Image (cartoon, rainbow, N blue to C red):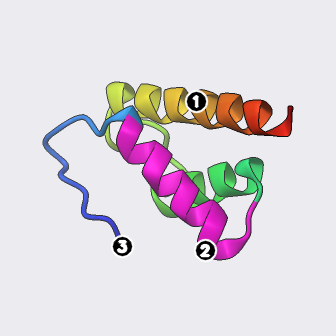
Amino acid sequence: MMTVNHASVLTKEYFVSYLTLIMKSREYTLPQAESFAYDFFFKGDKVRYGDSTWSQFEKAIKEIEKILCENEV
């Protein structure tokens, strides 16, 4: 389990690593990993760690989508 510091904004890079780990270890698609993270990490509350952290989570999803699209070509 990755440690969370409640006092700071988690970065896009943190979430790229976190989501990638979920996808590889559980053999999930990105939407499945996103749903898992929302339920498990955020406990169903997107502002649990603040708006800025949620924004970084969304940016990580977009980055992974871009990487996946590039790998399909």
- In the image as oriented, which residue stretches furthest toward the left? 7
- Answer with left or right where residue 66 lies relative to residue 51: right
Q: Position of residue 28 (x, y in %)?
A: 74, 63
Q: Which residues are magenta?
A: 13-28
The type of residue carrying mark 2 is Ser
Residue at position x 37%, y 26% from top?
A: 51
Q: Secondary structure at mark 3?
A: loop
The image quarter in which residue 33 lies: bottom right
- Using the numbered discs, state the Cα–Cα distance from disc 3 to disc 1 in whole angstroms: 22 Å
| CB under 8 Å between discs 1 and 2 | no
Q: In the displayed structure, would residue 57 be above or below residue 52?
A: below
Tell me if mark 1 has few (under 14), some (14-19) or many (20+) residues whose alpha carbon lies within 10 angstroms of its own: some
**Could you tell me if residue 15 is visible in this image?**
yes
Q: Earlier in the sequence, mark 1 or mark 2?
A: 2
The type of residue carrying mark 1 is Glu
Q: Which residue is mark 1?
A: 63
The type of residue carrying mark 3 is Met
Q: Which residue is mark 2?
A: 25
Is 17 included in the stretch rendered in magenta? Answer: yes
Q: Secondary structure at mark 2?
A: helix
- Using the numbered discs, state the Cα–Cα distance from disc 1 to disc 2 in whole angstroms: 19 Å
Residue at position x 48%, y 36% from top?
A: 57
Q: Which residue is mark 3?
A: 1
